[in-house]
Image: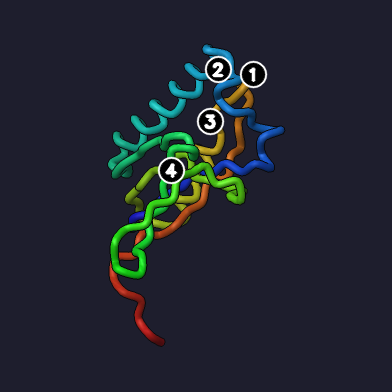
Amino acid sequence: MKYMLLMQFADADADKIPPMSGWKPEEIQAHIAFMNGFCERLTASGELVEAQGLDDPSQARIVQAGPDGAPVVTDGPFPETKEFVVGYWVVDCETEGRALEIAGEASTAPGPGGEPLRMPIQIRRIMAEPPVEP
C-alpha cells in the first residue's frame, strides 16, 4: 500500500521549532544529512516512491475555476492559515504500521541544538481504487 507522509508545521510550533532562517549552518547541515540518510534507507528497503521539500508558503498559489471556467489565482502568504505542509514522502510499504514507523523516524529529524524536532507527520493512504459502498 502507498502512503503519503506530510511533514507539517504550525504557527503554534514556532516557539518549539524556529524557522530554519534562524538555525546555525551546522544545524541545517545536520538536518539535511539526516533527511538524506533517511531517504537513502527508504530507497535501499524499496519503500521510497518519492520525497520532496516544499518552498516557503509565501510562494504558494491557490487556483480555482472562476464563473467562466477560467483559472482565478490567489497569491500567498495566507495569514489565516495556521498549518502548512513543508515536505512530503510517498512510501510503498506492506502495512499501515510500517508507515507509522517511518513517520515516527522522520519526526526525529534534528533541529536547533541537535534536538529532535518531533514535528507532526500526517499519514494518508493513497487511494488505489474508489471506495466500495457497504
Q: Is residue 31 left or right of residue 67?
A: right
Residue type at mark 2?
Glu
Q: Residue at x 49, y 40 (%)?
A: 57
Q: Are marks 2 and 3 in contact (CB under 8 Å)?
A: no
**Pair 3/4: label in front:** 4
Question: Where's residue 78, x and y in %?
Answer: 55, 46
Could you give the CA–CA distance between mark 4 and mark 1, rounded to whole angstroms? 30 Å
Q: Are marks 1 and 2 in contact (CB under 8 Å)?
A: yes
Could you give the CA–CA distance between mark 1 and mark 2, rounded to whole angstroms? 7 Å
**Pair 2/3: label in front:** 2
Quadrant position of residue 89? top left
Position of the C terminus by quadrant: bottom left
Q: Which residue is mark 4?
A: 60
Secondary structure found at label 4: loop
Secondary structure found at label 2: helix
Could you give the CA–CA distance between mark 1 and mark 3, rounded to whole angstroms? 12 Å
Of marks 4 and 2, which one's residue comes earlier in the chain?
Answer: 2
Residue type at mark 1?
Gly
